[in-house]
Amino acid sequence: MNILLLVSSMHAGGAERVAATLSRGWVQHGHRVTLVPTFTGKGKLFYPLHPDVKLTWLADHLGRLAQTPLVPLVKLRALRKLVKQEKPDVIVSFLTNVNVMALMATRGLNVPIIVCERTNPAVSSSASSGLQRLRRLLYPHASMVTVQAEGSVSAMKQLVPNMKRLAVVPNPLPPDLPLPESREPAASGRQRLVAMGRFVSSKRFGPLITVFERLAACFPQWELVIWGDGPLRPELQAMVDGAGLSDRVLLPGRTQQPWKELQAADLFVLTSEVEGFPNALIEAMALGLPCVSVDCPSGPREITLDGQVARLVPLYDEAALEAALSDLMGNPEARQVLARQGARSVRERFGLEQVLVHWDRLFSEVK
């Protein structure tokens, strides 16, 4: 099968990593894959691709008109020309803005197109009002619309009531993810609670710092490390300094080695008020970390099997979050049991081969 995969960019993001992982799996299964980042500024390839994946930057096809006010129309024309040239059997498109552009550019070409939402559309603010209107207008013309979690299905149906098909396809675990047995202790010698994400209000790292402040005296051997960066860094650092915890709550910035940092941790926590499908949570579980997650829309409830293979606490309930963290920080046996259960569960459900089975089914349905 000839697959044309459209993404906004290949920068360091969750959708981009999934695109690299899926394209690798597809070519290893004998498919032909052309990966097309559509960002006009082109950018760099952050995630390595399988050598058999053909990488085509849409920016290279825009010509002299790339810097004019007509660039949206130029992109549509360039993408339509590229589709005619590549003659794909199916187009897979990631992210709302790319999905809308793909549907506009391919009208009348009779190529099956699967558009993929990467967030929960009911609570995400990533799509402008104009983009939301275009989504409602154009998604019914897609051969298939996918969301990442069952928790997004009802919202998608309400926002776009006339879709032909709607399917749930989870993100795959990266195939080169280390095994749980390869975990190492933190260099600091302390036990480590870890969180990861952009320093924005929706990640709720401020409340996490407050919860850890209440736990710190009872667990002097523990530290909190929050990997990431963003506009709230000064505010979060001020909270840490004000609590007198600058040696126990660390904000080291972004990391190019998230798996290595997770392997050096003893407990992972997700505190977001919204997620599309939290890659950091399933990867932490797959690496053998016991995990605590808030029950935000969408993904954590499904990933944790309603709290059976990781602790699940109500969103905005800091007392429940504190209790769950306290219980696990003080109980190494409970952490070991939860780590084994979580790793086995997510690897069985979200391994690349298992997710590729979902995609094979979708491809057969839209032919």
Image (spheres, helix red, strand yellow):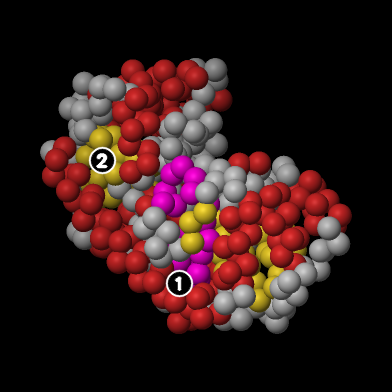
Question: Marks 2 and 1: which is nearer the front?
Answer: 1
At label 1, the amino acid type is Leu
Marks 2 and 1, how far apart in space?
A: 30 Å
Q: Residue visible at 70% across and 82% down?
A: 189
Task: Please say if 133 is above or below 239.
Answer: above
Residue 18 falls inside the magenta stretch: no
Task: Please say if 339 is above or below 275.
Answer: below
At label 2, the amino acid type is Ala
* Residue 46, image x, y percentages: 52, 54
User: Considering the numbered disc 1 on the image, is that residue within a helix, a strand or a loop?
Assistant: helix
Left or right: 197, with 123 as reference point = right
Q: Residue visible at 86% across and 55% down?
A: 242
Q: Nearer the viewer, residue 9 or 18?
A: 18
Q: Residue visible at 20% across and 44% down?
A: 362
Hey, which quadrant is residue 111 in on the image?
A: top left
Q: Residue visible at 26% across and 40% down?
A: 167
* Magenta range: 280-301
Q: Which of 272 and 319 is in front in this view?
A: 319
According to the picture, the residue beneath numbered tag 1 turns out to be 338
* Residue 200, image x, y percentages: 66, 43
Q: Is residue 85 visible?
A: no
Q: How crowded is mark 2: few (under 14 residues within 10 Å), some or many (20 or more)?
A: some
Among the two numbered marks 2 and 1 on one chain, the one whose residue lies closer to the N terminus: 2
Circle on res. 167? 2
Task: Please say if 311 is above or below 138.
Answer: below
User: Considering the numbered disc 2 on the image, is that residue within a helix, a strand or a loop?
Assistant: strand
